[in-house]
Amino acid sequence: MAAPLHELTKKGSPDPVVWKQECQEAFDTLKAALIKQPILKVPVHDKPFYIAINASDSGLGAISLQEHEETRHPMVYLSQKLIPQEWNLSSIKNECLAFIWALNKLRPYLWGQQFTVLSDHAPLQWLQTMQNTNAKLQRWAWKLQEFNFTVEHIKGSQKVIADTLSRKDSG
């Protein structure tokens, strides 16, 4: 969704910016998505936080949610394109990367809070208790120890927004 706009912010982008039709379409699509329901809510620190994450072969996506009137509403949307070194990560490493990235981005909201991570990648439930994992997964598991969270496995169809944010045309 935002890829043409991200391209304009890259180091080495033309100066002045060349605003193409695809840039305008991406801008209009993002603007429409941000002003329609559900509208972003302000975080309330005495309510539980939920973080839906996803990784695709081209990007990462996350959404921070909180319950208001028995419905989970978004507080923050995040997306990021993968860099070339990340394109060939295994599925578990890709999902862990999304996990670490989202928690780092959302640290101001999550620090000292108990929260739930929603993911369609079941192995994330056991990341902190896995034995004999490779060094990268072990380092990431250690980084996660500073947070107070549980991982809830959900069907991919239940986290459409995070899934969409991680796709190629999103980041």
Image (cartoon, rainbow, N blue to C red):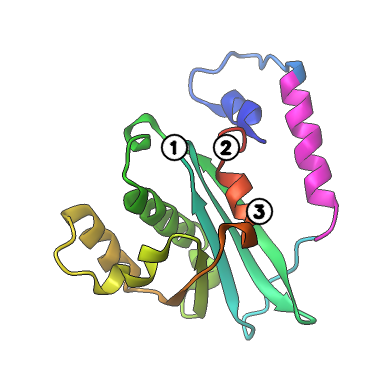
- The residue lying at 48 percent from left, 23 percent from top is 11
Answer whether labels 1 and 2 touch (C-beta < 8 Å). yes
For label 1, the residue is 82
- The residue lying at 68 percent from left, 14 percent from top is 18
Please rate how many residues cluster around mark 1, counting C-alpha atoms within 10 Å: few if below 14, some from 14 to 19, many from 20.
many
The earlier-in-sequence mark between 3 and 1 is 1
Name the chief secondary structure element in magenta: helix
The magenta stretch spans which residues?
Answer: 22-38
Q: Which mark is residue 171?
A: 2
Q: Position of residue 82 (x, y in %)?
A: 44, 37
- Hey, what amino acid is under mark 2? Gly
For label 3, the residue is 161
The earlier-in-sequence mark between 1 and 2 is 1
- Hey, what amino acid is under mark 1? Leu
> How far apart, in angstroms, are the residues tagged by discs 1 and 2?
8 Å
Q: Answer left or right for 150 relative to 73.
A: left
